[in-house]
């Protein structure tokens, strides 16, 4: 069987390869998104005191450390068996919203926009953020500004932009200062205007991407995410809900501690990324999706004025849930607008500057589960400790893992559409990579490269002969 190997997949956060398997006639038979890096956090945290877990697990990622801190701290809150102060809960939400803005800006402006604005067939040596900045400097500046704002929110709350140690079991380490609140509020009108500009611009381009919309992981699936009691968009707290491709609930909403009733994990020998699946449907039939697309499909409304208007337009795209993962780009921009509006709402709360931001206690439970919505989707931290509060077992189910089955099917769908195996054209292979970028995977650590990307794509015949080669 012939193989086409794309390694590494470019413009994603981490190291991975795509392998396409072709029959003797050159037709695509199978596709694999292969993650070739190891996450060892579940093992090397064993034996550590539970109160170290938020800071330790934040090191899982340099892009979304806040998500890990929050899910970890929520699991630790359960170990303490405490209700954190109201102000602490609001400050945690603010931190998460700041991260949502900076991460969505990174995904849209830096990683995917070169495809969307320059074109999938643009020369790869300039199909990147620097090439984009050369063509449209204002677009690039806006992306930088939006990401900067999100990072500044994190810094003004937690003292540093990356890997802050502010979120702790029982709440947060320190209250919000009035000067920091006022600085964020002063910038919000311009940030909201900027987001709306790019939302409008993106919506105007949708007609140009109908082919991509049709084959970028567009298929029926389940969707999973958090919801709150009023059914509004939720990123920090609430219950787990799963809906089917028609929008109907798949069972009852679950308390986070009951997540194992819905979610199980499988492994394959050819990748280090696990395969979560919906337990009642089995593996691999229990495929589901998480992230901004799933959250907008789950939510009855956003709960903020401007984002709710945008959600109504998003819902008008189709009857029922939006199924194309290409529309995740659209959903990210709507969530970014929501995050800015929600930050404004939270900063107006009368107790946002309250000094009571941490509850203290000893170990009162030996098991805790914390769930939060990371930018890429639902993040689960599950810990067991001994009587001294030392970690005996830990499991982390990350958003990219939840999407693993859907990513595998998505690249296969795109490969069937774009490739026939007779020749390699870089732009067609880039479209398959772009399916992965639409999911915005985060593979535990970021990829760093200096100079040219070391990318070689080879078409290998059944006898091992290299039939064609493309090098970036």
Image (cartoon, helix red, strand yellow):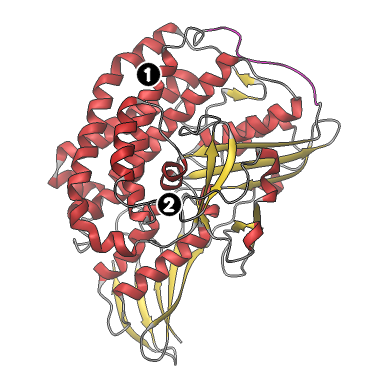
Number of residues whose C-alpha sits closer than 10 Å to that of mark 1, classed few (under 14), some (14–19) or many (20 or more): some
Numbered range of the magenta stretch: 354-363
Determine contact: label 1, label 2, CB under 8 Å.
Answer: no
Please tell me which residue is depicted at 36% across the width and 10% down the height of the picture: 182
Magenta segment includes 361: yes
Q: Earlier in the sequence, mark 1 or mark 2?
A: 1
Q: In the figure, is residue 431 to the left or right of 140?
A: right
Residue 133 appears at what percent x and percent y? 18, 43
Q: Is residue 322 visible?
A: yes
Residue 178 appears at what percent x and percent y? 43, 7
Which circle, 1 or 2, is nearer the viewer? 1
Residue 358 appears at what percent x and percent y? 64, 15
Secondary element at tag 1: helix
Please tell me which residue is depicted at 20% across the width and 34% down the height of the picture: 197
Secondary element at tag 2: loop
Please tell me which residue is depicted at 40% across the width and 91% down the height of the picture: 24
**Image label count:** 2
Q: Is residue 6 visible?
A: no
Residue 137 appears at what percent x and percent y? 15, 39
Q: In the figure, is residue 125 to the left or right of 148?
A: left
- Residue occupied by mark 2: 447
Choose top left, top right, bottom left or bottom right for residue 173.
Answer: top right
Q: Is residue 466 above or below residue 267?
A: below
- Residue occupied by mark 1: 344
User: In 3D space, how far apart are the residues under numbered discs 1 and 2 (Cα atoms)?
Assistant: 34 Å
Residue lying farthest left?
A: 135
Number of residues whose C-alpha sits closer than 10 Å to that of mark 2, classed few (under 14), some (14–19) or many (20 or more): some
Q: Main secondary structure of the magenta part?
A: loop
Please tell me which residue is depicted at 75% across the width and 32% down the height of the picture: 49
Magenta segment includes 406: no
Q: In the figure, is residue 126 to the left or right of 247?
A: left
């Amino acid at each position: 069987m012939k193989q086409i190997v794309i390694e590494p997949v470019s413009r994603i956060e981490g190291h991975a390869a795509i392998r396409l398997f072709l029959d003797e006639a050159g037709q695509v038979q199978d596709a694999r998104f292969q993650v070739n890096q190891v996450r060892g956090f579940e093992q090397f945290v064993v034996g550590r005191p539970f109160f170290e877990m938020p800071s330790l697990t934040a090191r899982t990622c340099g892009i979304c450390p806040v998500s890990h801190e929050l899910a970890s701290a929520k699991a630790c809150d359960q170990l303490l068996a405490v209700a954190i102060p109201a102000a602490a809960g609001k400050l945690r939400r603010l931190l998460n919203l700041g991260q949502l803005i900076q991460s969505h800006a990174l995904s849209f402006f830096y990683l995917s926009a070169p495809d969307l604005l320059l074109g999938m067939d643009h020369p790869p040596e300039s199909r990147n953020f620097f090439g984009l900045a050369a063509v449209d400097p204002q677009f690039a500046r806006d992306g930088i500004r939006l990401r900067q704002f999100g990072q500044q929110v994190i810094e003004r709350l937690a003292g540093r932009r990356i890997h802050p140690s502010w979120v702790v079991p029982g709440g947060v380490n320190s209250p919000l200062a009035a000067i920091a609140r006022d600085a964020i509020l002063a910038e919000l009108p311009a940030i909201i205007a900027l987001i709306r500009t790019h939302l409008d611009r993106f919506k105007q381009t949708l007609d140009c991407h109908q082919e991509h919309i049709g084959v970028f992981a567009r298929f029926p699936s389940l969707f999973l995410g958090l919801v709150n009691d009023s059914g509004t968009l939720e990123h920090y707290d609430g219950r787990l809900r799963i809906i089917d491709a028609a929008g109907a609930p798949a069972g009852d909403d679950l308390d986070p501690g009951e997540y194992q009733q819905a979610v199980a994990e499988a492994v394959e020998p050819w990748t280090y990324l696990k395969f979560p699946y919906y337990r009642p449907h089995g593996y691999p039939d229990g495929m589901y999706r998480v992230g901004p697309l799933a959250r907008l499909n789950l939510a009855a409304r956003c709960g903020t004025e401007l984002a709710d208007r945008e959600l109504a337009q998003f819902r008008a795209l189709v009857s029922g849930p939006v199924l194309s993962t290409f529309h995740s780009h659209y959903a990210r921009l709507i969530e970014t607008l929501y995050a800015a509006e929600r930050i404004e709402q939270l900063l107006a709360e009368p107790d946002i500057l309250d000094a009571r931001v941490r509850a203290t206690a000893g170990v009162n439970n030996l098991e805790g589960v914390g769930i939060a919505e990371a930018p890429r989707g639902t993040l689960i931290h599950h810990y067991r400790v001994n009587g001294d509060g030392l970690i005996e077992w830990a499991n982390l189910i990350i958003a990219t893992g939840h999407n693993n089955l859907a990513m595998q099917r998505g690249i296969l769908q795109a490969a069937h559409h774009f490739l026939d195996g007779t020749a390699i054209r870089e732009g067609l292979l880039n479209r398959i990579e772009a399916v992965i970028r639409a999911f915005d995977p985060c593979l535990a650590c970021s990829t760093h490269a200096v100079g040219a990307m070391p990318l070689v794509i080879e078409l290998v015949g059944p006898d091992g002969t290299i039939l064609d080669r493309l090098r970036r």
